[in-house]
């Protein structure tokens, strides 16, 4: 791939997607014979977390830009809007670092260009294609998983959440680690199809296949939307604020 001085990172690759789909179809059969790829199903009290769906990942022009981000945001928005109508909690995350010295930047920068993620830049804003609302918290994380070093797990447990819907970028790192941690913390974990992005072909397909085999359910967006539309907001623990009028 030629050097890209203008930071335009939607590239074109020669890639045989049909061959990959055939291989995964055969692999699914093998896994299911061995007892893998079981269904977790939906619980009674879901929440949604988006993973790095800020402009740096979901809009063109940044080293972290993902391919097909327009389509990923469009599918994710369907899920978010259904959740908003039913009062389902939504937590966004983004990875960013503070100040010129970036003292909160760890060793991970030795592998990927994390120093480009200035926490105070416009790139760190949740992408407007998701129509984020002011009451939806934005968690600033420092590593891959939405759970690592954040308050997400404690808050979900307090609210009584039993199911976590995960969408965002990238399939191979931050989404994957968030999904693994979600299951590890005891949540049923759901990834809606078409709501996960990455930078090169095959990465999304491979990681979704492997996550579905071991850590989560990968479910069509329409099915997730229908599930969210049926949620009763009374299932959640409410914060008691004794000084509220």
Image (cartoon, helix red, strand yellow):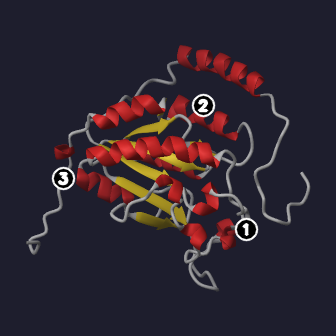
**Identity of the residue drawn at 67% across and 68% down:** 114
Image location of residue 47, percent across then percent down: 34, 47
Mark number, residue 237: 3
Image location of residue 60, percent across then percent down: 69, 58
Instruction: Specify which label sits upstream in the sequence, 3 or 1.
Output: 1
Pointer 1 residue: 110
C-beta proximity under 8 Å, tags 1 and 2 = no
Instruction: Specify which label sits upstream in the sequence, 2 or 3.
Output: 2
Image location of residue 96, percent across then percent down: 57, 70
C-beta proximity under 8 Å, tags 2 and 3 = no
Image location of residue 39, percent across then percent down: 42, 25
Q: Which of 71 and 211 is in front in this view?
A: 71
Res 99 → quadrant: bottom right
Q: Nearer the viewer, residue 162 or 192?
A: 192
Q: Is residue 27 left or right of residue 227?
A: right
Q: Is residue 214 left or right of residue 110?
A: left
Mark number, residue 209: 2
Mark pair 3, 1: CA separation: 42 Å
Q: Nearer the viewer, mark 1 or mark 2?
A: 2
């Amino acid at each position: 791939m030629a050097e890209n001085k203008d930071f335009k990172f939607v590239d074109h690759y020669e890639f045989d997607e049909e061959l990959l789909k055939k291989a995964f179809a055969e692999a699914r059969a093998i896994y299911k014979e061995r007892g893998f790829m079981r269904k977790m199903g939906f619980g009674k009290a879901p929440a949604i977390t988006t993973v790095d769906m800020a402009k740096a990942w979901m809009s063109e022009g940044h080293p972290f830009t993902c391919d097909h981000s327009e389509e990923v945001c469009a599918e994710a928005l369907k899920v978010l809007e259904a959740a908003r109508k039913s009062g389902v909690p939504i937590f966004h995350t983004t990875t960013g670092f503070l100040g010129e010295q970036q003292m909160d930047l760890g060793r991970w920068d030795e592998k990927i260009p994390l120093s480009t993620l200035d926490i105070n830049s416009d790139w760190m804003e949740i992408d407007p294609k998701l129509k984020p609302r002011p009451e939806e918290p934005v968690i600033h994380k420092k590593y891959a998983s939405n759970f690592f070093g954040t308050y997400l797990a404690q808050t979900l447990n307090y609210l009584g959440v039993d199911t976590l819907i995960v969408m965002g970028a990238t399939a191979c790192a931050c989404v994957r680690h968030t999904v693994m941690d979600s299951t590890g913390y005891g949540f049923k974990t759901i990834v809606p199809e078409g709501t996960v992005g990455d930078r090169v072909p095959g990465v999304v397909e491979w990681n979704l296949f492997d996550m579905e085999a071991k850590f989560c359910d990968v479910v069509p967006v329409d099915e997730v939307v229908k599930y969210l539309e049926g949620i009763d907001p009374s299932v959640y623990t409410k914060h008691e604020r004794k000084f509220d009028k």
